[in-house]
Image (tube, rainbow, N blue to C red):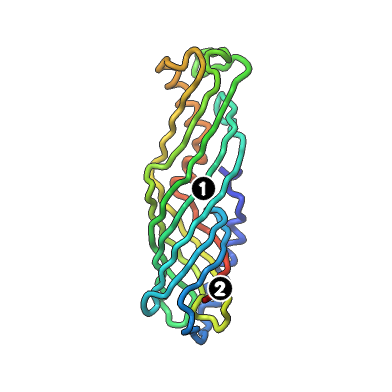
Amino acid sequence: MRSYKNINVTKAVSILAVSALLSTTAYAGNDDSMFALGAKVGTAGVGIEGRAHIADNLYGRFGVNYLHYNHSLDKGSLNYKGKLTLLTVPLMLDYHPFDNSGFRVSAGIAYNGNKVTATAKPNKTVTLYGADYAPEDLGTVKSKLTLGSKIASIVSIGYDNSFISESSWSFNAEAGVMYSGKAKIKVSATGLAANDQEVIGDLNRDANKSLNKVKKYLKFLPIVSVGIKYNF
């Protein structure tokens, strides 16, 4: 679903590749710093992120990412007005395989509050799988897409020179994937046929058709981001 992918992924990955090359350069460590905090932007939304040193070449990260976006969904018979909400709270471990290098490999979990809500209110007769429905039959139709698990897993590679650079400011970039499980779609209607299970079944099929692309996108959400931090 390209309309939801506001972030220029190609540009972000290019930045990540350049950063990985730069990571071969050694820096004098900033031993006095205990914690780094900053902001980032990426496919998971706009976020804040903290990072702390745990052991040699091992760091912990904690953050919050958020994005809200409105978009029309018209792949099915009903024209939905969709609202995408991305909300994740990741907890990650970063391992730097090379001493004094910003290159890292990461794994972790995240609270997954990503969802899509969509509303359709037809003003003319709609045909769903061979059956005609007047506006009063359907009324207002609401669909909600949620992911299969509230706890999602994340793997990524990236670059982060916090605690490594001589400067208090640091740069970070990341590319990976978050697996959210199988999506669930629930549909309800307020019209005269709202209690007819056959009608609800047709509405579910139509909603799945409209939300199919975003459903696949959110199941394996690409994690691509760039950001900056300040060492304290």
* The disc label shown at residue 76, or none: none
Q: Earlier in the sequence, mark 2 or mark 1?
A: 1
Element at badge 2?
strand
Give the x, y percent position of residue 223.
50, 56
Q: CA distance from mark 2 to mark 1?
A: 25 Å
Query: 33 or 42, which is in the foreground?
Result: 33
Residue at 57% x, 35% y: name it.
82
> Considering only vertical position in the picture, is 116 above or below 110?
above
Give the x, y percent position of residue 115.
48, 41
Query: 58 or 231, which is in the foreground?
Result: 231
Give the x, y percent position of residue 173.
54, 66
Name the kind of residue labelled 2 in the image: Tyr
Element at badge 1?
strand
- Give the quadrant of residue 99: bottom left
Which residue in the structure is indicated by mark 2? 230
* The disc label shown at residue 86, or none: 1
**Closer to us: mark 2 or mark 1?**
2
- Give the quadrant of residue 69: top right
Name the kind of residue labelled 1 in the image: Leu
Quarter of the picture containing the N terminus is top right
Residue at 51% x, 41% y: name it.
214
| Few, some or many residues within 10 Å of mark 1 (<14, 14–19, 20+) | many
